Amino acid sequence: MGVDKKAFRSLSYGLYIVTAEHEGVAGGCVVNTFTQLTSSPFQVTVALNKENVTTGLVKESGRFVCTVLGESASMELIGAFGFRTSTEFDKFNGFTVQRDGAGVPYVTDSAVARFSMRVVNVVDAGTHLLFIGEVEEGEVLGSEDPMTYAYYHQVKGGKTPPKASSYVGDGAGEQPAASEAAKAEAEAPAAEKRYGWQCTVCGYIVEMDELPDDYECPVCGVGKEMFERVEL
Ligand code: FE
């Protein structure tokens, strides 16, 4: 029998930002594939797409930081690290940046916890590299609930970037992109229907009748042609 892509939807994940720096170049990306591997010693794994700038930085520097995002994480933060490219956009600009004991930068906005790793092994997994890291530093940074991948899709209306490990294409990895508030409003019988535009790349929604020709998504940077009309 074949592989039913829908089966992958039943897997649970969190949402994390992995950052690294090599020779003065810093980068970061959003991942859902950060996992604890062993407790003695503390080891973790993370799978990163070979096309990501961050992947090269982790490989070259042999270090990375992972911050665990809380439910308050903004689409701007997720968009900056999840949908933009480090080579043409300073992902760290506008966010609170700290450095760990080894000097690796990380963002503390909406962070619940932070781990700093030294890479001890790399496995080539085709499109991705699987990094095994020994945890050298770990700390709690916030008390809110960590954001799950399901929460990101269902409540935040988030999309899965094509380079993510969990991307399955054909919309199979996507959930309906209406926020809880928008759903409640749509169900209210007396409510007048309102329309807006949703970015098909990152899920960002803007309430506007018509988008200007030079409109750019404030989250992922794509143009007007990547937006589709949605009922709010
Ligand atoms: Fe966007």
Image (cartoon, grey):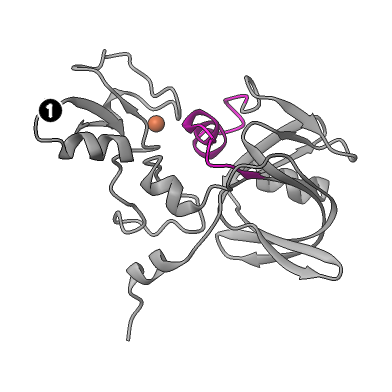
Residue in view at x 33 percent, y 16 percent: 215
- Regarding residue 99, the answer to whether it shows in the image is yes
Q: Tell me where residue 7 appears, x and y as whole percent.
A: 37, 71
Q: Which residues are magenta?
A: 68-90
Residue in view at x 61 percent, y 30 percent: 87
Kindly give the residue lying farthest to the bottom in the view shown: 1
Residue 175 sits inside the magenta stretch: no
Camera-side residue of 89 and 211: 211
Q: Quadrant of the C terminus?
A: top left
Q: Tell me where residue 156 appears, x and y as whole percent.
A: 41, 40
Q: Tell me where residue 38 appears, x and y as whole percent.
A: 77, 70
The answer to whether residue 149 is above or below residue 27 is below
Give the image quarter of residue 124: bottom right
Camera-side residue of 182 and 78: 182
Camera-side residue of 168 and 10: 10
Kindly give the residue lying farthest to the right in the view shown: 101
Residue in view at x 45 percent, y 30 percent: 220
What residue is shown with label 1?
193
| Residue 194 appears left or right of 77 | left
Estimate how packed mark 1 is, as few (under 14), some (14 to 19) or many (20 or more) residues with alpha carbons within 10 Å. few
Q: Quadrant of the N terminus?
A: bottom left
- Regarding residue 131, the answer to whether it shows in the image is no
Camera-side residue of 61 and 37: 37
Q: Quadrant of ligand 1?
A: top left
Give the image quarter of residue 99: top right
